[in-house]
Amino acid sequence: MSKLILRVAICCIILSVSSNAQSTGARIIALKCGRLIDGKAAQARENVTILIENNIIKEVGAAVSIPANAEIIDLSNATVLPGLIDCHTHVLLQGDITAEDYAQQILKESIPYRALRAAAACNRSLLNGFTTLRDLGTEGAMYADVDLKKAIANKLVDGPRLFVAGRAINTTGHYLLSNKEYAWELKLPKGLIEITGVDEARKAVREEISYGADWIKVYADRGYYRLPDGSFRSLANFTVDEMNAIGDEARMHRKKIAAHAVTRDGILYAINAGASTIEHGFALDEECIKTMVSKGIYWCPTIFVNVYVAEGRAAAGNPINKLLLEALPETFSKAHKAGVKIAFGTDAGGFSWDENQAKEFSYMVKWGMTPMEAIQSATTIAAELLDMKGKIGEISAGALADIIAVQGNPLTDIAVLESVQFVMKDGNIVKR
Ligand SMILES: [Zn+2]
């Protein structure tokens, strides 16, 4: 074929593709919003229209011209927001106040059964307005989160878009199930990968990535206790060399680390090894706060899970969560005032999926955030944490059409986010 004929042929193919798109017609939706909180602007806007083509937001404004073939959805008496993002969940877990609750799931439920329960949890979360989750560890269900992510992406089941961590990493003997509580000759299933030494640390990260983990989750500390001066301490799980090996290996594969770390003993060495997000961090002290601000480290405070487990664990003889919870309002307020990047993360799954994870918002506002800051922690800040800025967590031209609506005004009553009335994910309406 001569070059000229080839060019004509290519032009014909392009023309036929574009005329096909016109004739089959993209799905156009115009959402009329009474009030819009777009995730980015400091103020809400009134009477705005969002124009959506397939799964992409094309235009947002007061004077959007609506094409004749658009489906019009009237949300003029509602507040419209970006789909919510929870940066810390466990869809394969169904609440574990006590070690027995945890063992019940690990020992008595097969991984396929747990995956089915996880699909139901995902569905529930989506209907509550959460269109994206970062799921931080399957708690013994191996890489079922990777399957679930695939099933959702392939539209086999409805659920939030998932970023997954596969199996979390800890050191030998420091996680459930524990042989201290069972006959020592039993080979017990574990809730994660256990490693000892630098080579195993590297191997675990490589395995995670080869099976499809988007994030590397580590358990940096355990064994929390309070000193007479009221400060909290813990035991570091890894040696510095092991933690640095995990950090180095993750960096080599361009993956980020989420570190479960409650006190300075876990937080500081995890950050030094390269952790991007601190999970729980209930006992952040001045130095942790300063380090996190200067290095731009995110904090997922997971308040509601602590509220959920504190009393039950205290009744079972372990009062540490209750003590940490008592100190948390002041810690939260200090970290917020100092400018730590606080991303919405609840640890849902650590509490039952029957509870709405949006309950977290009320605590954030009660302890010092404005409602707009709390909303942005679950939209634009969370999107930034996930390296998805501009794609999710905001309602603006070019972003994916993840959109929710509530009755009432969350800027005057944040609890209305616990009753989401309308959910669109990726341009598909899943609740109306
Ligand atoms: Zn967790």
Image: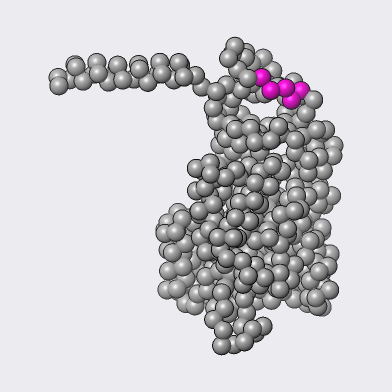
Query: Considering depth in this image, is 432 or 234 the residue closer to the camera?
Result: 432
The chief SS type of the magenta part is strand
Residue 132 locus on image (x, y percent)? 61, 45
**Residue 75 part of the magenta segment:** yes
Residue placed farthest to the left in the image?
2
209 versus 431 height, above or below: below
Is residue 220 in view from this perspective?
no
Q: Relative to 95, is 323 on the left or the right?
A: right
What residue do we see at 47% from left, 71% from top? Answer: 201
Classify residue 222 by image quadrant: bottom right
What residue do we see at 67% from left, 70% from top? Answer: 104
Q: Relative to 97, is 92 on the left or the right?
A: left
Q: Which residues are magenta?
A: 72-76
Classify residue 160 by image quadrant: top right
420 versus 68 height, above or below: below
Classify residue 115 by image quadrant: bottom right
Residue 21 locus on image (x, y percent)? 44, 20
429 versus 117 height, above or below: above
Residue 296 locus on image (x, y percent)? 61, 52
What residue do we see at 57% from left, 39% from top? Answer: 389
337 versus 390 height, above or below: below
Is residue 185 in view from this perspective?
yes
Which quadrant holds the N terminus? Answer: top left
Residue 53 locus on image (x, y percent)? 55, 24
What residue do we see at 62% from left, 76% from top? Answer: 177
Q: Give the number of callouts.
A: 0
**Residue 291 part of the magenta segment:** no
Q: State how the image is colored.
A: one colour
